[in-house]
Amino acid sequence: MALSDFPRMGFDPFAEMRRMQSEMNRLFSGTGFGTARDFPPINIWLGDNSVVVTAELPGVTRDDVTLNLQDDVLTLEGKREPHQPEDGNWQRRERSYGSFSRAVQLPFRIDPDRVQARFNNGLLEVELERLEADRPKKIEIRAP
Amino acid sequence: MAQEVRTTDQRTPARTGTPDRTHDRPVFVPPADIYETRDNIVVVAEMPGVAPDGVDITLERRVLTIRGRNAGNEPTGYQRVYSEYADGDYERVFTLSENIDRDRIEATLKDGVLHLVLPKSETAKPRKIELKAS
């Protein structure tokens, strides 16, 4: 899912199409999360020169998750192991398992040395700072 | 400048018609796996974002209620621009099939997953009946 530049201008000609597309996706992908495309659910928070991506990954430890950063794309991949009981009958099975991979396109290029990732209570929080060279530069207008 | 917020939350909200809560936060139903072994019933419920001190488990006769209160997880100084899940509390009520030994219930919360082991009381375990030679 890409964050295009249009929303920042206040007018997005593709908002309606994207909304319809996500409706169709939801219709065809079934209910609940667990489809490979939609796991883990993420939120994106935007600051002035940094971005925070949070993901819900309950039951996953830090070793099961890999974060990769390439310019402005953050890739989150990993695996969630099922908890197998030694003996016993399943009465209800609602959680999903398996490997997951998601790529998030961020609104600007990121400085790979200034990324912080925290993982608490099943919530992964990745804070990414904008690359210095990518920041808008103030241009002085010289007096004639 | 207003940012467009897209929400594609797929979690199950709690039933409408239940009494209002004092906090105005959404309440979700945590997905749970339940399996039954010979000696225990194990409930594994997902409650991401909940710290161990935010969990409330009560067992009344055969009704088990699990509640998880979400610690504030929102980063400050940022604006939400894309949302696939909402911050909310969790609540789920189960009716158990066996009699449970209340004093030996064990609950652990790790990485947002609640692991609840409910040992069956002795009277509920199947007892083999020996045939006496006549």
Image: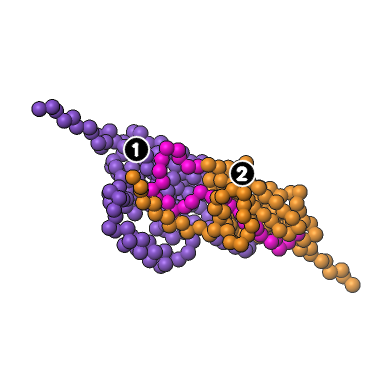
Chain colours: A purple, B orange
The type of residue carrying mark 1 is Asp
Name the side, left or right, on which B109 lies relative to B87. right
The type of residue carrying mark 2 is Gly
Farthest residue to the right: give it: B134
Q: Magenta stretch?
A: B73-99
Badge 1: chain ID: A
In the picture, the disc for residue B54 is 2
**Viewer-closest of A24 and B79:** B79
Compared with B98, B50 (above or below) is above
Task: Judge if badges 2 and 1 mark residues of a common chain.
Answer: no
Which residue is labeled 1 in the image?
A48
Badge 2: chain ID: B
Farthest residue to the left: give it: A144
Q: Quadrant of residue A107?
A: top left
Q: Which quadrant: the N terminus of chain B?
A: top left
- Name which residue lies at 49% across and 61% down: A32
- Name which residue lies at 76% across and 49% down: B103
Residue A61 appears in the picture as rendered? no
- Name which residue lies at 53% across and 59% down: B12
Name the side, left or right, on which A141 lies relative to B40. left
